[in-house]
Amino acid sequence: MAAPYLYLASRSPRRRALLRQIGVDYRVIAVAVEEVAAAGEGAEDFVCRMALEKATAGWDCVNGFGPSAVLGADTVVMVDGALLGKPGDEAEARSQLSRLSGREHQVLCAVAMVCAAHQAVRLSKSRVWFRQLSPALIERYCATGEPLDKAGSYAIQGQAALFIRRLEGSYSGVMGLPLFETGELLHGVGLQVLFE
């Protein structure tokens, strides 16, 4: 049986770049999923559900277009038990960055694969320590526009790399697509990766 063609249920340029980094051929499919935590839903359950809902929504769009598989992902930043998603505006970005300043936080990134006979979810957990950020530094960073479409209001692969004192976990997971877990999912559906 032929390996399925991969669709990425995300318009994130970071996720696209990470898939290109590991030599995976894919197409982007746009999906709309309401990203709201259910009452009493824990952070890990939420991020896994979101990744699976995105992959499932993508599958609903491509099902029937020959052998295909859909990859979905979701990322949240957690500090003091609160989830920090993408900021709605610059004021929220400043608030989130102030909250992360000089502290440790957790980044949860889930990735899900859906195809005709299979669905699976993997979770990556990372810990990140920020340096102390002055209000002036936060203001300059927000003025770059970089924080506005990132969970937790920062991009580890961008200028915010200057903020990170320490990282335990997955660099690619903090970017938005944990490549170890993604590789396992790709391998599981017969897509060519570097695994034996």
Image (cartoon, rainbow, N blue to C red):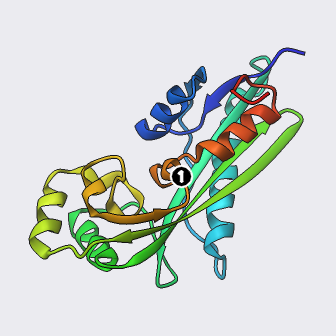
For the point 67% across and 31% down, the residue is 61
The quadrant in which the C terminus is found is top right
Whether residue 86 is visible: yes
In this picture, residue 8 sits left or right of residue 132:
right
Q: Is residue 26 above or below residue 44?
A: above
* Residue 60 appears in the figure: no
At horizontal 74% and vertical 18% (from top left) the residue drawn is 65
The residue sitting at 39% across, 71% down in the picture is 129
In x, y percent, where is residue 113? 73, 41
Q: Is residue 61 left or right of residue 28?
A: right
167 above or below 19? below
144, above or below 105, in the image? above
- Spot occupied by residue 90 in the image (x, y as percentages of width and height): 21, 63
Query: How many numbered discs, if any?
Result: 1
Front-most of 193 and 110? 193
Residue corresponding to mark 1: 173
The spot of residue 158 in percent (x, y) is 29, 47
Q: Secondary structure at mark 1?
A: helix
What quarter of the picture does the N terminus occupy? top right
Q: Residue 116, image x and y in percent?
A: 85, 32
The answer to whether residue 61 is left or right of residue 81 is right
Q: Quadrant of residue 13?
A: top left
When the figure is inspected, residue 75 is found, relative to residue 14, above or below; the finding is: below
Q: Residue at x 21, y 51 (%)?
A: 145
Q: Callout 1: 10 Å neighbours few (<14), some, many (20+)?
A: many
Q: Callout 1, which amino acid?
A: Gly
